Image (cartoon, rainbow, N blue to C red):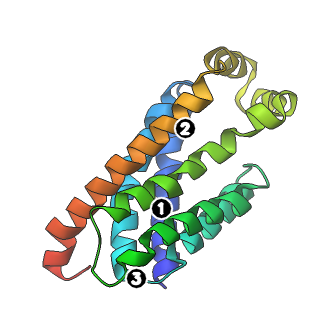
Amino acid sequence: MNVGVFAALYFVVVFGTGMLGIIAPWVMFLGYGLGILLNGIVIALYVSRTPKFGALALIGLVNGLLFWATGHPWFTPILAPLLGLAGDAILAARRRDGLSAKRFPLAYAVMSLWYMVPLLPIVLDPAGYWTYVDETMGADYSRRMQELFQGWVLPAWAVAVFILGLLGGLLGVRATRRHFERSGLA
């Protein structure tokens, strides 16, 4: 039950903040950055309520399937749970001593790297990707996005996602300890 509830919360935050990208291509980075930070709280509470190995992989699988169903690449439901599994491996030593302020931010940052997956077609199939953006968002949006996505943008965004994941993880630990543990929710 926790998986379904928290996967839905996670999806709503990611999708809702990602929709800011409709405004302009560069705004997508702000929206996703905000989503990564906010979901640090969601995932920290989820991990504290579901202290089982594989919990992050399940969130990755459910959300990977949801994002694939909404038009993202077919490999999203494969890579998202694998990154979640890597996060689970980082958390494995933490299971006995509660939500670890040291391990959780790193695990969440690794899991958050799935944000790169929808952008991989820019490298793997650029013609197909830009045709898709052209058809779904319009030629002007596609042109502005192509101008934005220079060779350095994806590696820089990967580093930013990781750093935002660390910050979101720290925020999640702090919020969980400050608000959810005191109220008995964590």
Where is mark 2, residue-wise? Answer: 158
User: Residue 93: horizontal and vertical position, in percent?
Assistant: 40, 76
Name the side, left or right, on which 114 lies relative to 98.
right
Is disc 3 in contact with disc 1, using a CB cutoff of under 8 Å?
Answer: no
**Mark number displayed over residue 90:** none
Where is mark 1, residue-wise? Answer: 10
User: Residue 43: horizontal and vertical position, in percent?
Assistant: 40, 65
Front disc: 3 or 1: 3
Amino acid type assigned to the residue bearing label 2 in the image: Ala
For label 3, count other residues whose C-alpha is less than 10 Å away and answer few (under 14), some (14-19) or many (20+): some
Instruction: Tell me the distance, in whole angstroms, between the alpha carbons under discs 2 and 3.
Output: 28 Å
Residue 141, above or below 118 = above
User: Which SS class for mark 3?
Assistant: loop
User: Residue 105: horizontal and vertical position, in percent?
Assistant: 36, 57
For label 2, count other residues whose C-alpha is less than 10 Å away and answer few (under 14), some (14-19) or many (20+): some
Front disc: 1 or 2: 2
Amino acid type assigned to the residue bearing label 3 in the image: Pro
Give the quadrant of the C terminus: bottom left
Instruction: Tell me the distance, in whole angstroms, between the alpha carbons under discs 3 and 1.
Output: 17 Å
* Residue 49 in view here: yes
